Image (spheres, helix red, strand yellow):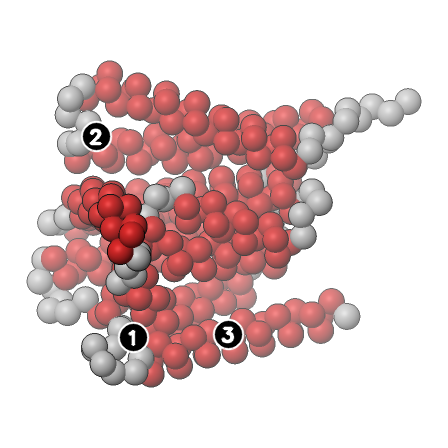
């Protein structure tokens, strides 16, 4: 007699994840209002919101889905969470190498995306999006406006480690893991989840770089077979921003080269960004060729 229940479809899993995330977001909002009242824009309220968002909105739904999969598909919880094995040294070295090599190209993309303008007919739409972008930047600038090393390390833990873990657990282990085990091809699944990952940030003028980052994190998870390596890649990206902003704001460095490297002055060709893009593609292609040979 078959003891297995009918497996849940990929679409149902995605709907479950989304529904639980929305419900948890409402819970987080209520908790913040109860604790801080009208002071929800306070820096401590924002820090608490970040913790609750990552733990309750992003991580908790994926854990609950893993428990559902255990009862319906007899899949271990660690399998659904893509945590059956730890990261490899080669995988971590790859993501660090790609981050360093790709930095000028990504900086150029960020600057290019920020400079995009909609047609004149959509001027009001652009102004609305710019206002949303400015509001989001004001919040992030407030969080990163640290003045001591202790505060900076706290933000590395919150913005770097915790946010990297929360978003990768939800988007890669949860959403990509569900689509990857369904009918969607791996490439379709990776780019669809990357699109959702970028869109949910509601920042049009950072959409393209974040889309590419999301796709990179997705491929890293599928290649490595675990979620820890993309978590490390995500945490590295966020943490470098926190540290470089702290060093620049507090005059430890006179120029934030981390954010401007590869951005050519107006009228000049971005040679460094192009070289960075070519080198990044070469490294990833070489890795894929070596990986395919091992499979053969």
Report x, y in % for residue 130.
Answer: 23, 49
Image quarter of residue 39:
top left
Of residues 178 and 72, the one nearer the viewer is 178
Q: Nearer the viewer, mark 3 or mark 2?
A: 3
Q: Residue furthest left?
A: 251
Asked if residue 12 shows in the view, the reply is: yes
Report x, y in % for residue 223.
Answer: 61, 59
Q: Against 206, is 280 above or below?
A: below
Image quarter of residue 209:
bottom left
Write down the residue under mark 1: 262
Write down the residue under mark 2: 45
- Sequence-first disc among 3 and 2: 2
Which residue does the image show at 56% across and 58% down from the upper left? 219
Q: CA distance from mark 3 to mark 2?
A: 41 Å
Q: Nearer the viewer, mark 2 or mark 1?
A: 1
Image quarter of residue 240:
bottom left
Of residues 76 and 198, the one nearer the viewer is 198
> Residue 281 bears which disc, if any?
3
Which residue does the image show at 30% across and 19% down from the upper left? 30
Q: CA distance from mark 3 to mark 1?
A: 16 Å
């Amino acid at each position: 007699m078959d003891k297995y229940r009918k497996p849940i479809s990929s679409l149902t899993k995605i709907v479950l994840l989304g529904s639980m995330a929305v419900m948890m977001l409402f819970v987080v909002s209520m908790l913040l209002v109860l604790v801080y009242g009208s002071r929800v824009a306070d820096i401590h309220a924002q820090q608490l919101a970040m913790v609750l968002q990552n733990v309750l909105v992003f991580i908790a739904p994926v854990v609950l889905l893993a428990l559902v999969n255990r009862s319906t598909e007899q899949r271990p919880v660690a399998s659904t969470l893509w945590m059956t094995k730890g990261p490899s040294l080669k995988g971590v070295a790859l993501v660090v190498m790609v981050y360093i090599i790709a930095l000028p190209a990504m900086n150029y993309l960020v600057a290019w995306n920020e400079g995009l303008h909609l047609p004149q007919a959509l001027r009001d739409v652009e102004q609305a999006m710019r206002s949303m972008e400015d509001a989001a930047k004001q919040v992030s600038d407030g969080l990163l406006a640290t003045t001591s090393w202790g505060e900076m390390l706290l933000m590395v833990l919150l913005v770097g480690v915790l946010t990297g873990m929360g978003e990768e657990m939800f988007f890669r282990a949860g959403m990509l893991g569900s689509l990857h085990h369904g009918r969607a091809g791996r490439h379709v699944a990776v780019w669809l989840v990357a699109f959702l990952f970028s869109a949910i940030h509601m920042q049009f003028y950072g959409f393209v770089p974040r889309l590419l980052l999301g796709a990179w994190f997705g491929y890293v998870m599928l290649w490595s077979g675990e979620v820890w390596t993309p978590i490390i890649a995500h945490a590295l990206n966020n943490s470098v921003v926190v540290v470089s902003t702290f060093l620049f704001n507090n005059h430890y460095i006179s120029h934030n080269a981390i954010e401007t490297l590869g951005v050519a002055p107006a009228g000049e060709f971005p040679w460094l960004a192009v070289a960075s893009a070519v080198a990044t593609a070469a490294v990833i292609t070489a890795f894929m060729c070596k990986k395919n040979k091992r499979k053969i």
